[in-house]
Image (cartoon, coloured by chain):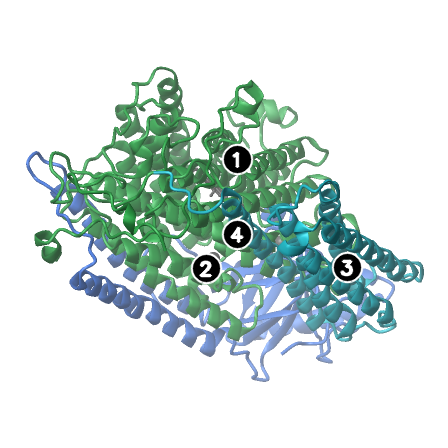
Amino acid sequence: MAVTRFPVPEESRRTSFVGMVMALASWTMLFVALFFAYAVLRLRASAWPPDGLAPLPKALPALNTLVLLGSSILLHFGSRPEAEAKRGALRRALLGTLALGSLFLALQLAVWVPLWRSGFRIDTGTYGSIFYGLTVFHALHVLAGLVALAVLLPGAFSGTYTSGRASAVRLSAMFWHFVDAVWVVMFVAVYLV
Amino acid sequence: MGDATMSKPVPVRHLHVGPEFHAEQHIHPEPTSFLSRYVFSKDHKVIAKQFLWYGLFFLVMGGVMAMMIRWQIAFPGTAFPVLGQLLWPQSGGVMPPQSYAAFFTMHGTLMIFFAITPILIGAFGNLLIPLMIGARDMAFPTLNLMSFWTNVLAGLCMIVSFFVPMGPAAGGWQSYPTLSTLVGSPGHGQTLWILGIFLTGSASIMGAVNYITTVVRLRAPGMGYFQMPLSVWGIWLTAILNALFVPVLAAGVLLLFLDRVFGSHFFLAGASITKGGGDPVLYQHLFWIFGHPEVYILILPAWGIVSDLLSFFSRKPAFGYKATALSMSVITLLSMVVYGHHMFVVGMSPLLSQGFMTLTMLISIPSAVFFLNWLGTMWRGSIRFATPMLFSLGVVFVFGLGGLTGLHLGAISSDIYLHDSYFVIGHFHLTMAASVLLGAFAAIYFWFPKMFGKMMNETLGKWHFWLTIIPITIVFCGMLVVGYAGMQRRLYNYEAYEFLKHLHPINVWITRAALLLGASQFLFVGNFLSSLISGKKAAENPWEVGTLEWTIPSPPPHHNYDEIPVVLHGPHEFNNPAVTGKDWLAQDEPIGDEPVALGAVGN
Amino acid sequence: MHQWPFSWLTTVDVSRDGWRAEALFWYTTLLCVIAFALVTFALVYSSWKYRARPGVKALYTHGTDRKSFAVTGILAALVFVTIDMNLVRVSQADVKEYTYNWPVSPDTVRIEVMPQQWAWNIRYAGPDGVFNTADDVVTLNEMRVPVGRPVMLNLKAKDVIHSFYIPNFRLKQDANPGYVTRTWFQALQPGNFEIACSQMCGWAHYKMKGDLIVEPEADFERWMKEAEGDAKRRFDPADREQLWGWEWVQ
Ligand code: HEM
Ligand SMILES: [Cu+2]
Ligand SMILES: [Cu+2]
């Protein structure tokens, strides 16, 4: 009765897709809860930023937003089945994304370090707690995303993914887009409004 | 009622078949090394057993702690037999107040996250989902393995916390700040608690993602959602709640961790001692956004299991099957929007409080529906009182008590008096301790033959049932009584208060019943172990029921199904008039020589 | 005064509004007992009536016909309307008439309460009516109030969350670090009653006790006069621990 209606890889590709969607839904709730905490603390505060604290820098983080968005676009086009099948395209997209992701982390450091040096720390009231808590936690996700993409590199070079249907590529890309989307919300919520 | 269906047998072969036809489920060769077979196994049946042992271990630990808590309440100043002397030799075996706080905190934590969750969700979720939907394993066997071992790490954090200076967490299982921050809890116990919760939460999410995907993707051909046994429904809904709400708890304890370790101010605020504009009540919101769904996370698998078992042993299709599945789903949805009923005395805005009260009351509607369906299932049945059935009836009984006392706590003006009293303790133990525990016992007695290939002893099982249901009712109803009398929860010595002194006799009786309850669990342990070693060999289908797991050998082979079954009927086709010679019908069994309609399979 | 079943179990209710909690409690209990009796009866009756007997087959029905649907639906709706909606109605009235209906009359006694591990700091505003000034009357673990006048509390915790609980008044309100919560009550008869903490606040939570002394108006005024005299004498601006209190939140 074992009727084969799809090529096997397609089946398990769909299954892992469903799993990843659930995992990301779960992850989304984590960030929703963190943003909820932020909203509550902010609504309770009489002034934001609290008196005596300078507003956060905007230029670098804005640039950083572009960096991440650029990486997502790159990865998206590089990991589409048609492109994935061509070794070169996938390789270029992965390398480009890794570079842009690392640039993002470097620029984040460039935001954090001067602020920290200027005396604005995680224990500088709820403002500091929120700022460092959210952005560092997000940066850890970027790091995890980078690792997930880096793991694909050897395969991309040796041509493991030329079928164009590899779950590993698709799932890592999904995670990367998710982390980017969270950043866009975070950028708006933490730096802009 | 039902006459129409009597005269015209339901056509049973029209079942909807989804597009997914599981060609991906290869038969993997059975692992051969000891490690890959029994320790780092990816076989859902082995992982189910691991979770079962793991959960039972913590159940014993949490249970002994409960006995000691009750001992202190009823017989303050006396040593708990044997263990007291070992644990607190410096006080002559008497539990000091610091340990009391640590013990009720860890009792609650261990019972919820490390006993009930592993047994019902970890063990039975793992065992039942693939077997009951006709799959060869979970969708992600490696994730399954990781889920278990992450849980073990979490358990280790909790156990290690007993041995650090100043002991384990002692701020209640909710660990409200600012008591759980450095202001109220110096020492590493609370930090380890956070770590343990974070890890066990991650493990729950891994499990949940796996369960949901498995149900969505790996149902056998013909197994539509409404052909799934209700046990699978319950576990599936639980998995959805786990996936969506455990992250909220994770966020809460993450912020708590930052406050403790990195000095942030999320929850720190105070009139004078603590500075900072943080908000301790924010944690309560996060906690209960998770916490209310959590009580359904615990009870939904038990509801599903009981719904199935009532039908199995009444030899009658589950009454209003769809309505039961849908009411469980509605409750799942409602459970996301009622959490504020835990915070009526926190000082929330009146408008919010009233909104939460009204939403809470809505839960009565779906609850009433499946209670009626349970009773409807038994109505005009032909009931066999095997041990699993007794425990299922026990669940209906204690959950009735627990659910109804929820009304007292859902209404603002009575809750203001009852909040944080023993009434709450009685209520939630009836709903999520007693009924879930009885549900777990029902499940163990019922699926033990499938898991281990041996039968458990029925006589001992029945004794175990009666010696459990009677004391458990006394214990928790007694708690309702002293709660109504005004006794707060978490009191090391309630006789410090004049207004509680007269409750002494009641408290002594509660403790006696609790000790009896504890003692009668030896019947279970003995039965379990001796059946494991020398129980009667179990046939393929000893209970004569039709769900898929009973169509394969006990215990099932490594890959469960030689051939993926094609499902033709619902899970409860008892006494179908078209069937002759027996009163049950396997889900994949054609009636007579009716042809298997494979042509119907497809989009 | 009201008479409730099993009154020997509970403390005497000496408050104007404690009956609300009791009334709702017993009303709910009555409905629950009826519902639970019905369920238990059905459970026991069908267990006995439909036990397996040789030759008797179970009925083959899925309970999906219209009639079963209607019966289930109607019963569930009935439960909701007769039990739940009733409780909501009563409770909404209580909330409106009492819980959040803050006393505004000029004779209201205003008290600030700042619990800490493990004691109750209590503060009256003194003659100037302003809190945290030199003439405040400050007590520890002892709250005095007059019979018959509304008493309104502002609570804020010093260290961890506590909960102000007076069983004889069927009243409970959390005190949180960081912001003020409110509650109010009115005593109907004099006497000495216990203040308890009902929120886990550390290992000595169980003995975080206070006294609530309800006295006739005249006694209360006499005590207050004396205490106000003392207060000025005892005030020491160098003792920072004593400098607490906040702007009144009505
Ligand atoms: C069956 C035997 C059990 C007995 C006799 C028992 C007894 C107790 C007692 C005496 C307390 C302390 C009440 C207090 O002073 O505040 C308590 C607390 C608690 N129990 Fe149990 N319990 C049992 C099973 C369970 C189970 C199976 C669960 C899990 C669902 C559970 C969950 C809890 C929780 C969450 C608390 C609250 C801990 C806290 O206050 O932080 N109990 N139990
Ligand atoms: Cu709740
Ligand atoms: Cu306290």
**Disc 2 to disc 4, C-alpha distance:** 24 Å
Q: In the rendering, what colour is chain A?
A: cyan
Q: Chain of mark 2?
A: B
Would you say the residues marked 1 and 2 are in contact, meaning their CB atoms lie under 8 Å apart? no
Query: Can see residue A8?
Result: yes
- Measured in 3D between alpha carbons, the distance from the residue under mark 4 to the one under mark 3, in whole angstroms, is 29 Å
Query: Residue A18 — which label?
Result: 4
Residue C52 in the image, given as x and y percentages of width and height: 13, 37
- Chain coloured green: B
Work out whether A124 lies above or below B180. below
Of the residues shown, which amino acid type is indicated by label 1?
Answer: Pro
Give the chain of mark 3.
Answer: A
Q: Please give the count of numbered marks on the rendered protein.
A: 4
Location of mark 1 (residue): B76
* Of A191 and C19, the residue lying toward us: A191
State whether label 2 is within 8 Å of ligand 2: yes
Task: Give the chain of mark 1.
Answer: B
What is the quadrant of residue B529 in the picture? top left
User: What SS does tag 3 mark?
Assistant: helix
Q: Amino acid at mark 2?
A: Ser
Can residue B479 be seen in the rendering of this structure? no
Residue C194 is tagged as none
